[in-house]
Image (tube, rainbow, N blue to C red):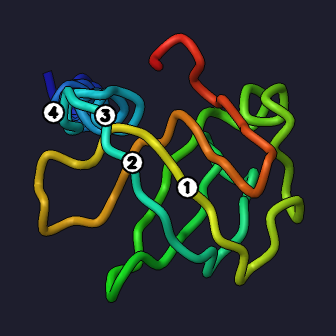
Amino acid sequence: MPRFRPVLFAAAALFTATPGALSSAWAHHGWSGQEEQLTSLSGTVVEGVSMAGPHATMKIKSGNDVWDLTLAPPARTARSGLKEGLIPVGATVTVRGNRNSDHSRHEMKTIFIQHGSAEYHVYPDRE
């Protein structure tokens, strides 16, 4: 039995870590932490579109609050026509999406961005 002890410990560690890892993955990619209703918001870009990571992101300031915007995955965001550097820092945008259910967090899973006359529908199936 002593030979198998390291294998048993490794298996126990794997099964213990898996639920947390899975729930983190679902929480990140799912919509369950967002409100059902759509919210519109206008603000000034403080951090332009970034295509790094599993989802494109950007930040805007609306009133006194800085909002973290999560867009679609980079390929889908690019298909909408939105790319890094296209909307400059300081530009005014209007966004629409599902804000975080916890209103103390200024986060939105964003489905639409308007900059001037340009419109980017990153999740058109959710509008």
Query: Badge 1, how many Cα within 10 Å: few under 14, some, many 20+?
Result: some
Q: Residue at x 73, y 35 (%)?
A: 77
User: Mark 1 falls on what kind of element?
Assistant: strand
Q: Are marks 2 and 1 in contact (CB under 8 Å)?
A: yes
Q: Residue at x 48, y 63 (%)?
A: 42
Query: Badge 2, how many Cα within 10 Å: few under 14, some, many 20+?
Result: some
- Marks 3 and 4, how far apart at CA: 37 Å
Q: Nearer the viewer, residue 117 or 57?
A: 117
**What residue does disc 1 label?**
94
**Can you see residue 69?**
yes
Label 1 vs label 4, nearer the camera = 1
Q: Are marks 3 and 1 in contact (CB under 8 Å)?
A: no
Query: Badge 4, how many Cα within 10 Å: few under 14, some, many 20+?
Result: few
For the residue marked with disc 4, what is the amino acid?
Thr
User: Mark 2 falls on what kind of element?
Assistant: strand
Query: Badge 3, how many Cα within 10 Å: few under 14, some, many 20+?
Result: some
**What residue does disc 2 label?**
40
- Residue 16's tag is 4
- Residue 38's tag is 3
